[in-house]
Amino acid sequence: MAIPLAYNIRNLTVRKTTTLMTALGVALTVAVLLAVLALVAGLQTAFQSSGNPLQVLIMRKSSTAELNSNFSRAAFQDLKFKNGIARNKAGEPMASLEMVTVINLESVDSPSGMNITLRGITPIGLEMRDGLKIESGRWFQSGRREIVVGKSIEKRYPNAHIGDKLKFGRGDWEVVGVMSAGESAVNSEVFADLNQVSSDYNRSEVLSSALVRATDEVAATALINDLKTDQKLNVDAIAEKEYYASQTNSAAPIKYLGVFVAVIMTVGSCFAAMNTMYAAVARRAKEIGTLRVLGFSRGGILLSFFVESVLLSGLGGILGCILVLPLNNITTGIGSFTTFSEIAFQFRVTPAIMVVGVLFGIFMGALGGFFPARNAAKKEILVALREV
Amino acid sequence: MFRYLPLILKNALRSRRRSILTICSVAASLCLLGVLMAIYHAFYFGEATPAQALRLITRNRISLATVMPISYRQKILQVPGVREAMVMQWFGGVYKEPKNVFARFAVEPARLFTLYPEYITSDEEKKAFIRERTACMIGRAIADKYNIKLGDRLTLSGDIFPVTLEFTVRSIYDSKDNNETMYFNLDYLFESLPAGRRDFAGTFVILADNPSSVSGIAKTIDDTYRNATVQTRTETEQAFQLGFISFLGNVKVFLLSICGAVTFTILLVSANTMAMSVRERVREVGVLKTLGFTNAAILGIILGEAAFLSLIGGIAGCIMASGLTFLVRQAPAFIMQLKTLTLEPSVAALILLAGVVIGVASAFIPAWNASRTPILDSLRYSG
């Protein structure tokens, strides 16, 4: 028969301070790991909710980002009438010619300024962004130096509110609206009239990239293949979803550092948990002897102490999850070396991440609890009973 | 105080397993604290090398991805205190496979060695690199990693620039700080671009005549172009590199909050151990008091034990941390500052101090309680 679980729980509650301190040690370790995971999850959400599965992004051959790509108006005229491109209600092909560059804005975090993606876009391009809507203000008018900023930009940059003027290109641009599109990367971009932006940057003929929507998924794949092999256009085509997904690696440096920290902290916490469990075993030598006299097997005792350690660190895991919960929905920003600009996103402490946290805590307890439990199980009855 | 030293040592060694586990645990945490603080130190307090202290970088105010006219050099050279200015253009591109990452810059070879005196290579190699238009110079680390020898061919296919360039390796340089960069001739890049898209500069690297004139130069250059169409931002090379770090996110907050969490964890671990160890010897404390030990002496003995354990942990932690920084230095150069990451003596001292302070602070409550328990109570205590 196994030793009842209640025995372990009572033991943990009797040694309140020790239990709590050990659990907190585990909790902090779990919290550090979870904070990093939440950051990565947040960034992933932002990129995964960007893009439409039917849309294809077209850039110059071998360029990896819209920023260093170029695409001419003439090529766009050829592109527009390719097979498989969907049409909107008005019967126009859903193809958008865009120009992407970066501008520098001062933020609270970095007074020397951060880079922001500026996108010159046409009405059809706006139509192709799913869920895009104006939160306040209005859209820019064509032929004017007016911009609409993403909602994350409005939040993070004090100089980018409606009515503010930003200086780039050949003059002052007025912020006339704030836009949002779910959780997508659009929230960290600035939109303006394509023709105005391109003339300000002397790029009226050579713009950055084109985005097209296919009629269905089969057509999208066919379109990608068709474009890649088109000698005349000489372009690379990539699914819009894939383009954004590949940018998740911007968090890689922070992720590596976070995992490194978590691993070393785990080692430390394991030793600490081991210490606590050894002390528990030593103090309860008499109890162990008594349990053995009562007929509980060595295996039962091993399991019991092991379970106690797991309970202890499981508690730590739960505490760790609670500690990181306040991080949820905090907005932060990371620079991407693909777009050379900052993307803002929110920490996401998802249920999956919390499960990972508790499991990680339990893992630490299992690692730290095994040797003390074996030590307890090995005790000889007579010696154990005689110990003080 | 010191006459109790043997007693403190004996006490610390009494439960070997516990002491070792505590030391290991404290060591792991302090090692981590050491590495993080070394990183923080390298980022925000790092001393510029003598050569670095003389260099400034001018770039387009809007962003690194936007260029400046090459003609800006004339005015920059006229600024008092400027000895030399060279165009340095990031090329990017792909060498064989996208995963082969190292920095590639188009530069003006004739000026390069004035600006970077720390690059060591033989005079013949230097001359060959300067003379030959399609020559390139690579750092020793790149040569070793990809097994490239002098005279080898090397091809880069561009991404920012729609060209494929073929080079001959004419020089391999050594440098203490950075030998993972490839340099080649800017003229070669310009020639391969269409006529209308030449003669730009991504950055200017500027050499000042002495470190004190650096800030004045930066201001003068930026003021010169304040009302121009293309404005500039000039900063020291160090500040420029720091800009890359801030690009990775809010690194400062990230490092500091982890340091905080780690410190707090050590506090917990160490307090826990000391509480356990004191609880075990309440009766003994009673005996000591009967023998005439004062409360203060007992407090001192227990605190001394805590300090001893955490000091040993701290020393082990520092040794591990310097080992880890060594490993970081061997990793591919993604962030410049990490190439020279070391555990500075000042940081190590700080870690040891932090360890001892944390150890003593955490032991204080159990020690205080033990020293004040009345003799009769402690003798009657059964554990």
Image (cartoon, rainbow, N blue to C red):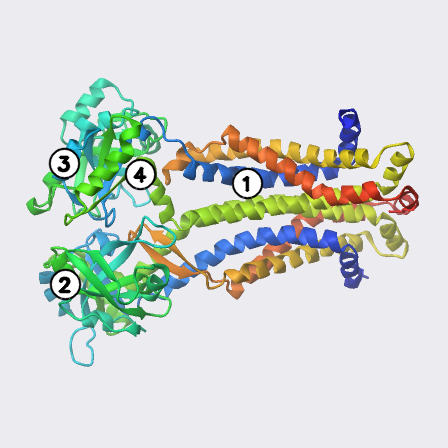
Q: Where is residue A151 in the image (x, y as percent from the top left)?
A: 34, 66
Asked whether A381 or A161 is in front, the reply is A161
**Mark 4 against mark 1, which lies toward the viewer?**
1
Q: Distance between the residues labelled 4 and 1?
A: 28 Å
Residue B91: image x %, image y %? 22, 42
Residue position marked by numbered label 1 in the rendering: B32
For residue B86, above or below residue A188: above
Identified at 47% across, 34% down, the residue is B327
> Front-most of B285 and A71?
B285
Are the residues under badges 1 and 3 in a single subunit?
Answer: yes
User: What whole-number distance in Å separates the C-alpha atoms at marks 3 and 2?
Assistant: 31 Å
Q: Are marks 2 and 1 on the same chain?
A: no
Residue type beneath disc 4: Phe
What amino acid is found at the position of numbered circle 3 in the picture? Lys
Disc on res. B102:
4
Res A48 → quadrant: bottom left
Q: Which residue is drawn at 30% across and 29% down?
A: B212
Report the amino acid beneath label 1.
Leu
Real-space CA distance between mark 4 and mark 3, rounded to the nearest whole angstrom: 32 Å
Query: Could you tell me residue A82's position as x and y percent?
Result: 15, 68
Rounded to the nearest angstrom, the CA distance separating label 2 from label 1 is 52 Å
> Badge 3 is on which residue?
B75
